Image (spheres, helix red, strand yellow):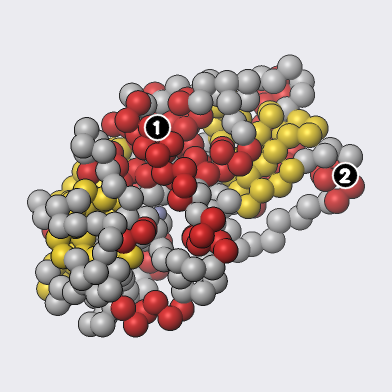
């Protein structure tokens, strides 16, 4: 089969590798849509890697032993893996599983982990079925396109009475605008890249503010009757934006962080937490039991084609990575068989 790899700084190509084989409840999925996520960071840094991607939708083509799936089933491949047995996995929060190190044994030949590939290997319980009326491209948004913001909004209880601040309008932040619109919430977006500012407006953001404005907290207060937003969601992974989420949220409001970040964020317990009564939430993906709900967003939202900016054949991987790293894009979806 073919899969995409990064071979050096700003260099990517498609190579031929052996196909994965089904084993026990791990089935082989023919990948029809593979969304790009943050892999462009490796493309830019030049760290060679041959396991790319963690989002996909496709069709089951080979089964060993599964009482959930059969050949021909259309499925979403949920990101990452879980042991399937611990309390977190059983509750649906498998993404936080800590017991999955032994799972590498199932990738006998080493292949099957990448989603930038024609076939992948995954446990049947991490492959929820796609309704007949949903395309592979739209279904694949149930991964990082809509998933992280959906999970955070479920936890924060975002609804039509919520004004939510969304910092960062990359693919995850734009997906957050789609989720906010679906719930009838009012979205205030913070973004500086013109392409993404324009997309956020097209998706229906009530306002798009520039993070470089020194009076941005005052601007947000002016838009919220002086109180601040009810909820905030950082999708940027930028410490200044994370701090803005805390400063711009009203007393007793909620703040979620879904943008990956390894830098220090200063939090002052009395003014930020005790006096303000903020709830700070770390959120990665969404509970697997909510898959039917996210699928409703995908079936009923009219905004999905604005969230997807490019659908490209995987053979154009070099061009696709250049597009992804330019930031002049929303969600980019690769087609391994085109
Ligand atoms: Zn587990
Ligand atoms: Zn992702």
Q: Nearer the viewer, residue 81 or 206?
A: 81
Residue drawn at point x = 49 percent, y = 68 percent: 85
Relative depth, front residue between 19 and 164: 19
Label disc, if present, on residue 297 of the rendered structure: 1
Classify the position of the N terminus by image quarter.
bottom left
Position of residue 103 relative to residue 32, above or below, is below
Q: Which mark is residue 42?
A: none
| Rendered residue at 82%/39% (across/down) | 277
Is 332 left or right of 297, judged from the image as shown? left
Callout 1 secondary element: helix
Q: Which mark is residue 274?
A: 2
Disc 2 C-beta below 8 A from ligand 1: no
Front of the two marks 1 and 2: 1
- How many numbered callouts? 2
Res 338 seen here = yes
Looking at the rendered structure, the secondary structure element under dot 2 is helix
Q: Left or right: where does residue 220 sit relative to residue 278?
A: left
Where does residue 273 sit, x and y in percent of width and height?
83, 45
Residue at screen point 20% across, 70% down:
64
Against 237, residue 89 (above or below) is: below
Mark 2: give few (<14), some (14-19) or many (20+) Cα within 10 Å: few
User: Height in image: 111 above or below 71?
Assistant: below
Give the residue displayed 37% in from the left and 44% down from the top.
Answer: 142
Horizontal and vertical percent position of residue 21 = 19, 74
Quarter residue 91 falls in: bottom right
């Amino acid at each position: 089969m073919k899969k995409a790899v990064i071979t050096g700084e700003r260099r990517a190509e498609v190579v031929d590798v052996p196909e994965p084989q089904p084993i026990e409840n791990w089935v082989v999925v023919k990948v029809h849509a593979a969304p790009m996520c943050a892999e462009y960071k490796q493309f830019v840094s030049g760290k060679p890697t041959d396991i790319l991607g963690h989002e996909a939708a496709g069709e089951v083509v080979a089964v060993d032993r599964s009482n959930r799936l059969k050949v021909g089933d259309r499925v979403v491949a949920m990101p990452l893996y879980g042991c399937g047995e611990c309390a977190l996995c059983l509750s649906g929060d498998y993404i936080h599983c800590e017991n999955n190190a032994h799972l590498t044994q199932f990738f006998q030949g080493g292949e099957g982990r990448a989603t930038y590939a024609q076939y992948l290997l995954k446990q049947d319980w991490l492959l929820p079925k796609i309704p007949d009326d949903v395309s592979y491209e739209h279904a694949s948004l149930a991964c990082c396109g809509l998933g992280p913001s959906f999970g955070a909004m479920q936890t924060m209880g975002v609804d039509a009475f919520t004004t939510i601040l969304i910092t960062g309008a990359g693919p995850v932040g734009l997906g957050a605008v789609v989720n906010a619109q679906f719930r009838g919430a009012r979205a205030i977006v913070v973004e500086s890249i013109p392409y993404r500012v324009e997309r956020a407006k097209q998706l229906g953001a009530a306002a798009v503010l520039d993070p470089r404005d020194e009076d941005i907290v005052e601007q947000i207060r002016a838009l919220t009757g002086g109180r601040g937003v009810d909820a905030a969601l950082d999708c940027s992974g930028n410490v200044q934006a994370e701090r803005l989420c805390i400063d711009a949220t009203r007393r007793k409001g909620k703040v979620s962080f879904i943008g990956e970040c390894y830098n220090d964020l200063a939090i002052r317990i009395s003014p930020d937490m005790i006096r303000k009564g903020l709830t700070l939430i770390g959120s990665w993906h969404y509970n697997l039991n909510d898959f039917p709900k996210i699928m409703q967003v995908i079936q009923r939202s009219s905004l999905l084609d604005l969230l997807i900016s490019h659908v490209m054949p995987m053979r154009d991987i070099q061009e696709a990575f250049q597009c992804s790293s330019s930031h002049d894009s929303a969600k980019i979806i690769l087609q391994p068989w085109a």
